[in-house]
Image (spheres, rainbow, N blue to C red):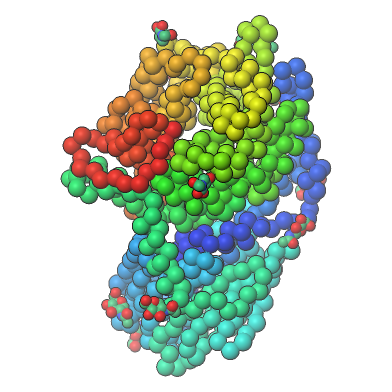
Amino acid sequence: MILNTVWVLLAFSTFLPLSNAEELINRKRVVKAFNPQHFTGLDYWTHGRLVNYEIQNPAEANISNWLVNNPQRINLGTIGFWFKNSAINESTLSQKIQILDLWTGQISSSFALNGSNVNVTTWCDPDSDTLAIQVHSSLLSAGELGIFFDYPYPDISKFDSPSVGVFNAVAKHDTKLSRKDGAAVIQHNIDNTTYFNSITWKGDGQVIGPLPDTHRYILGFANGVTQTQLTAKFSASLMVGGRDYSSIANASMKWWESYWQDGAFIDLTGSSSSKAKELQRRTILSQYLLAINEAPSNNSPQESGLTNNGWYGKFHLEMTLWHLLHWGRWNRWTMLWRSIPKMYDLFLPSSYQRARRQGYDGARWGKMSDPTGRSTPGDINALLIWQQPHPMYFAELEYRSFPNTTTLRKWNTIIEASADFMASYAFYNHSTKVYDLGPPMYLVSENTNENATINPAFEIAYWRFGLDVAITWKERLNEKVPTSWTTVRDNLAPLPTVDSAFAVYEGIPDMWSNNTTVEDHPAITGIYGLLPPPRSGPALNMTCVRNTAEKVRRLWNWDNLYGWDWPLLAMNQLRLGNVNQAVEYLLDPAFSFDDAGYPESNRVPTPYFPGASAFMLAMAMMAGGWVDEVGPHFPEEWIVKVEGFSPGL
Ligand SMILES: *[C@@H]1O[C@H](CO)[C@@H](O)[C@H](O)[C@H]1NC(C)=O
Ligand SMILES: *[C@@H]1O[C@H](CO)[C@@H](O)[C@H](O)[C@H]1NC(C)=O
Ligand SMILES: *[C@@H]1O[C@H](CO)[C@@H](O)[C@H](O)[C@H]1NC(C)=O
Ligand SMILES: *[C@@H]1O[C@H](CO)[C@@H](O)[C@H](O)[C@H]1NC(C)=O
Ligand SMILES: *[C@@H]1O[C@H](CO)[C@@H](O)[C@H](O)[C@H]1NC(C)=O
Ligand SMILES: *[C@@H]1O[C@H](CO)[C@@H](O)[C@H](O)[C@H]1NC(C)=O
Ligand SMILES: *[C@@H]1O[C@H](CO)[C@@H](O)[C@H](O)[C@H]1NC(C)=O
Ligand SMILES: *[C@@H]1O[C@H](CO)[C@@H](O)[C@H](O)[C@H]1NC(C)=O
Ligand SMILES: *[C@@H]1O[C@H](CO)[C@@H](O)[C@H](O)[C@H]1NC(C)=O
Ligand SMILES: *[C@@H]1O[C@H](CO)[C@@H](O)[C@H](O)[C@H]1NC(C)=O
Ligand SMILES: *[C@@H]1O[C@H](CO)[C@@H](O)[C@H](O)[C@H]1NC(C)=O
Ligand SMILES: *[C@@H]1O[C@H](CO)[C@@H](O)[C@H](O)[C@H]1NC(C)=O
């Protein structure tokens, strides 16, 4: 027997996130090996005092490692075709066709084996973690062709791609089959994590297994059976019953139709330009893939969504904005509201604690996180700061669309906690008489010496933006504005410049003359790309803004850019009025999307979804404008129709 996972695995890995499988995945497996309370981290000198950070301590390497590896995201299962004739493999099959219908969510696949057709239709229930599969084939008869179900052991690699899980660590976990006419339940136990896969089918068949030395089960059929409809449901507790094949097909059609009918849209099909065609292709396919991979409940998406595991399957709070903000601008608020601001509410207690332990007020948001809000040990994880004002961005964007007290109240505590930390983190420098950010800190590009990094241009601009929003928020609510917020905002260190352009941080050696400073994420273009012009303090110096965009274009190291960098550069060019340059950035050959629309990366396994979600944010800016500038802003000769975008910042 040979695994032929192509068809059903694809459906599994791409469809599941629509409902609450992620709850199950995120339950994750915890092996009781260490007590996280025993992790002590490291103390770093911070403005004359020792502050404790969640950084690996060489004296406690084992627990640090364990905290990096745990908890683990689980691949719940793999479903595919099993052939009785073990000589058959994928290349034995002919006439392989697969069609995904974006409008209904239906995947139709067919292939021929030795002149016999096998036809498969796959759906996913939008309201439960259930796949519905229909197979037509004379090979089903007498067990020539069956359907397998396989359950892996979790993986602890930093990147698990293309598939996730270990299929040959059979002794480390355990599965149990129970049967009842026309149905089977497979229970999977991994340490103390248990979940169930309930399988139902039509036609005379049964599930057997596991096959020797595997956790693989086979659904086979009796003589004369040439078609079946089956459902496979994953759940954390045993749940029999539920929708049948045709109800799931109907529910999928309904869900996808309303998804495509709702929200904003960009139609570039009237333009003959090949650039317009490619942007259209990416825009459509990204809407589909992001709905599946990038709209979880509670937590932020992980960088590769539900397709595989990246960075140990943990998610990153500084990336939350790129992952999710586009939902708001594309007027798909319900997708955003699945996790925002819920995630911040959930992480508030641990973030208050983090700040308090370090001697600051308010809540310090972590970076690389697990679903409980616990930080993964690491120097960058502990010292990055640009995730801190993200709640203000989300909140302000929402307020532009929903200027009501529900919005104000919903965000008030989160904004207050974020701003309290921001004000108390900024350090008053008695010699320069300004408030400094860092050291120690990591800035957006994570590539400078943390003990030398002070007043990074983007972070200074973002601190001002965040405090401006926080102050306005309190004014809108008629509540008192804490004086610490205004004092810090009004006395922030100025944006550092070198050669009449923004510098990555104040005092960076050889900015613009040494190629090691012009590397990685070009966050200085976000000052007038991601962020709107400042509401307080001196106006941005537009000579510096333009020089920065131009120097980055000429001098930056293009080989090391990835993901959201191109959309960021494009957003900066849009605000500067250079639409054609923005399009060039979005279509840069190094910023590629594969034939199925997955965003590729030269640095990590595909997909790297922040590329797609940031792309959608840049497209929303082109179509829907920003601040008081309403769109659309496309190349002049293009014929463009847009509708439904929410106002931007
Ligand atoms: C598994 O065990 C760990 C540690 O004992 C515990 O924290 C966790 O809640 C347990 N998980 C489940 C799903 O029971
Ligand atoms: C930064 O300073 C801390 C001590 O405060 C030290 O442990 C760490 O190694 C330093 N980092 C670098 C890159 O020198
Ligand atoms: C850390 O783990 C290694 C490998 O399992 C083990 O040999 C070593 O004794 C452990 N160290 C401590 C301090 O527990
Ligand atoms: C598949 O089977 C064919 C015929 O048995 C064989 O020639 C080929 O090497 C096999 N391919 C793989 C990838 O195993
Ligand atoms: C194809 O069919 C022929 C005739 O029925 C049979 O002899 C042969 O074994 C089949 N090949 C495969 C790969 O099933
Ligand atoms: C199976 O698929 C093939 C190719 O798409 C198609 O020609 C045929 O009509 C399908 N058969 C059934 C029973 O659906
Ligand atoms: C699915 O939709 C079709 C067409 O609207 C309808 O005839 C059928 O009864 C529905 N099936 C179920 C189970 O809801
Ligand atoms: C107020 O804003 C919320 C979003 O925060 C929205 O769901 C609600 O419909 C708005 N209420 C009114 C009355 O507009
Ligand atoms: C005050 O600012 C200057 C210039 O940025 C810097 O060199 C100095 O280290 C700062 N002082 C303190 C105490 O951080
Ligand atoms: C803006 O920056 C340029 C270049 O550094 C400088 O010449 C100019 O005076 C600045 N303008 C203002 C208003 O500060
Ligand atoms: C560039 O900067 C790096 C890192 O600070 C340094 O090691 C290198 O010597 C510099 N190169 C030149 C040509 O100045
Ligand atoms: C940076 O400059 C050094 C010295 O001129 C050169 O050897 C190196 O290849 C350059 N690196 C990049 C990434 O351009």
**Is 103 rendered above or below residue 625?**
below
Q: Is residue 303 visible?
A: no
Q: Residue 56, located in which quarter of the rendered image? A: top right
Residue most extreme to the front: 478
Q: Is residue 205 visible?
A: yes
- Going 46% across and 37% down the picture, which residue do you hit? 400
Asked whether 414 or 30 is in front, the reply is 414
**Is 329 rendered above or below residue 488?**
below
Residue 561 rendering spot, x and y as whole percentages: 43, 33
If the image is split into quadrants, where does the C terminus sit? top left
Asked whether 56 or 45 is in front, the reply is 45
Q: Residue 632, located in which quarter of the rendered image? A: top left
Residue most extreme to the bottom: 223
Residue 462 rendering spot, x and y as whole percentages: 53, 26
Residue 403 rendering spot, x and y as whole percentages: 49, 39
Number of callouts = 0
- Going 37% across and 66% down the picture, which residue do you hit? 104
Residue 353 rendering spot, x and y as whole percentages: 75, 37
- Going 42% across and 93% down the picture, which residue do you hit? 224
187 sits left or right of 631 in the view = right
- Going 65% across and 50% down the picture, which residue do you hit? 371
Asked whether 365 or 330 is in front, the reply is 330
181 sits left or right of 120 in the view = right
